[in-house]
Amino acid sequence: MGTDLTVRRAGVEDARVLAELRWAFKREDHEGPVPAERPVAEAEEWLRKRLRGGPWRAWVAERDGAVCGHVFLHLVERVPEPFADNDPLGYVTNFYVAPPFRNRGAGAALLAAVDGYAKGAGLNTLIVWPSERSAPLYRRAGFRAPEELLERPVSP
């Protein structure tokens, strides 16, 4: 396995591999009984639509030309107000690096790409709901617990 790591913005042509990695990610994190699995093609079609434009952005990490990880960013518009900036927020999600490529710089490189985009696009804040496993990486990248955020899960 080589060491050539690159990070680039994902495009529509990456939809299939992103869908496959999404399924790998969710299988890895799934606990309990395994229900019937939905086809990867559903995720692929969803991704194709989002990668054509709109509020979704994605980046892939490639090692020797093969995609080994990804991260997504959803731009969240803010309602305009007269006395503060109205820059959007960025919701970081679906961050995954395949197990053989972890602890080799791919995760940090993906977050650096998101950060560079956020600065260039004038985003106000980046937010994430990290897993227990990913929280240390986010903290190393400068993410901190918010002082003003409240959360209420919507129950049936």
Image (cartoon, rainbow, N blue to C red):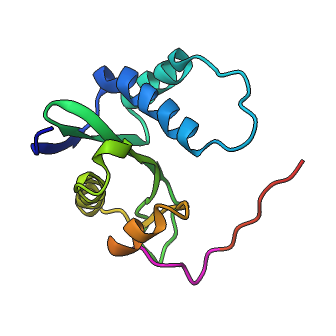
Q: In screen coordinates, is 67 left or right of 24?
A: left
Q: Is residue 142 visible?
A: no
The one of 49 and 95 positioned closer to us in this rendering: 95
Return the x and y of residue 135 as percentages of the image width and height: 47, 67
Q: In screen coordinates, is 8 left or right of 123?
A: left
Q: Is residue 138 above or below residue 46?
A: below
Q: Is residue 77 above or below residue 99?
A: below
Characterize the magenta stretch by its predominant secondary structure. Answer: loop
The residue shown at (30%, 58%) is 111
- Which quarter of the figure has residue 70? top left
Return the x and y of residue 127 as percentages of the image width and height: 48, 64
Q: In screen coordinates, is 83 left or right of 29?
A: left
The one of 84 and 153 positioned closer to us in this rendering: 153
- In the rendered image, the residue lying farthest to the right is 156
Q: What segment carries the magenta color?
A: 143-149
The one of 73 and 43 positioned closer to us in this rendering: 43
Q: Is residue 56 magenta?
A: no
Return the x and y of residue 130 as percentages of the image width and height: 52, 62
Q: Is residue 74 visible?
A: yes
The N terminus appears in which quarter of the rendering? top left
Q: In screen coordinates, is 41 left or right of 60?
A: right
The residue shown at (36%, 25%) is 17
Q: Is residue 146 magenta?
A: yes
Q: Is residue 140 above or below residue 42?
A: below
Q: Is residue 78 above or below residue 43?
A: below
Return the x and y of residue 114 as percentages of the image width and height: 30, 55
The residue shown at (20%, 41%) is 8
Count of numbered circles on the image: 0
The residue shown at (77%, 59%) is 153
